[in-house]
Amino acid sequence: MTLLRRVPSRYFLAPINTGFAVRGAPTDRLVAFHRNRSGHGIGISYVGNVAVGTQYATNERTLVFSEERVEWERLVRTIHAAGSWAGVQVACRASTEAASRQWRSADLAELRWAFERIATDELDAIVGLFGSSARFASDAGFDVIQLHAAHGYLLSQALNPWLNIRRDEYGARPMLLLERVIEAVREAAPHCALDVRMSLSDGVATEEEEWGIREQQIASVVEMGVDMVSLSSGMYEISRHLIYPSRAQGLAAYLPYGLYLAGRHVRMAWNVAGNVWQLPEAPEVLPENLSFSIGRPLIADPLFIEKELRGERSSIRACDFNGACHYYTRGEPHLVCPVSEDLRPGW
């Protein structure tokens, strides 16, 4: 039985770094955000971008697991009470520079140098931090743990042969870091479903060149016995436009890849993100092992999925692609959305 036969719905709240954190801990605003975006047709409500340690956080408003579990347990109970599974995305951003507030592209050579200079024993220690984070998540009651191996985070850097030119074992075997993290997380949280988020393309070579390598890597992850592979694309430092496809790129920009992989690996659960701003027509004809992560439409209207499934599109507070949800590059401390009733600027 695949994971998706047990989850309440195949439509998920995508993991979002909301900025609703203080000293790494969940705030009342974060609990309210997920209270509003659980149930209502949402199978998994993912808490986004929880760093494995303070030194590996994206910015000062990023969530980080600590010894205090009370607020985390309250967050999980809130999601469960609304009717969704509680998911958490665990991530590691290893950089000597603060996250840029500008929509600028970094030089690949600069990223290559930064990844190469991370000591081997530091990468070994990070594997352990993923394991301890997974144990905390399990103890707090989360049902699903997603490893962030996309968007230029540390695990995705190891997978990228245009970036990973290390001379140690992590360079000789680009899959090794992710493999060891998966093993550590499985051991630490055996009762949690394990999801791995991977980029189909990082935007550093041609689509065909990148896909040829990434398809092999995805197949290797399937063989590692994870419960789901979530598909996205892009790197924050190089190709943010792939992470946040434009409206012009159409409905579910990466759906063709999801359909292909779901048909090729029928025992694996698959998830597709990227411009899911309408639910695909005739969902009953889609593979039963395929699911969808939805970000911007659920930011704008927490009832988006429920209204879509009921055919009530005219009542949806539709995302208008105003870009305000990219709050960090706009100098805001947390997520805002002028379309939404609970995320308006100034609240």
Image (cartoon, rainbow, N blue to C red):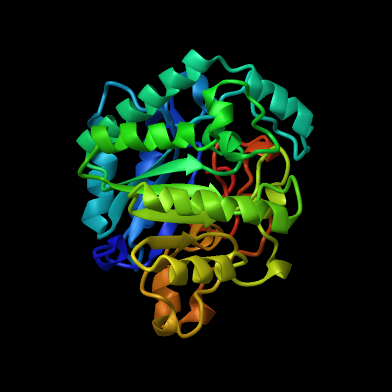
Q: Give the answer, above or below, for where 257 lies relative to 140.
A: below
Quarter of the picture holding the N terminus: bottom left
Viewer can see residue 59: no
The residue lying toward the viewer, choosing from 36 and 260, is 260
Residue at 64% x, 21% y: name it.
Answer: 116
Q: Give the answer, above or below, for where 76 lies relative to 181.
A: below
- Write down the quadrant of residue 21 in the picture: top left
Q: Tag count in the figure?
A: 0
The residue lying toward the viewer, choosing from 213 and 299, is 213
Viewer can see residue 298: yes
- Write down the quadrant of residue 179 in the picture: top left
Q: Give the answer, above or below, for where 268 lies relative to 170.
A: below
The percent coordinates of residue 236 (x first, y second) are 66, 40
Residue at 52% x, 70% y: name it.
Answer: 260
The percent coordinates of residue 122 (x first, y second) are 49, 16
The percent coordinates of residue 272 (x first, y second) are 50, 62
Q: Give the answer, above or below, for where 305 lies relative to 299.
A: below
Residue at 33% x, 49% y: name it.
Answer: 225
Residue at 25% x, 45% y: name it.
Answer: 192
The residue lying toward the viewer, choosing from 306 and 284, is 284
The percent coordinates of residue 115 (x first, y second) are 63, 24
| 178 horizontally vs 8: left or right | right
| 275 horizontally vs 137: left or right | right
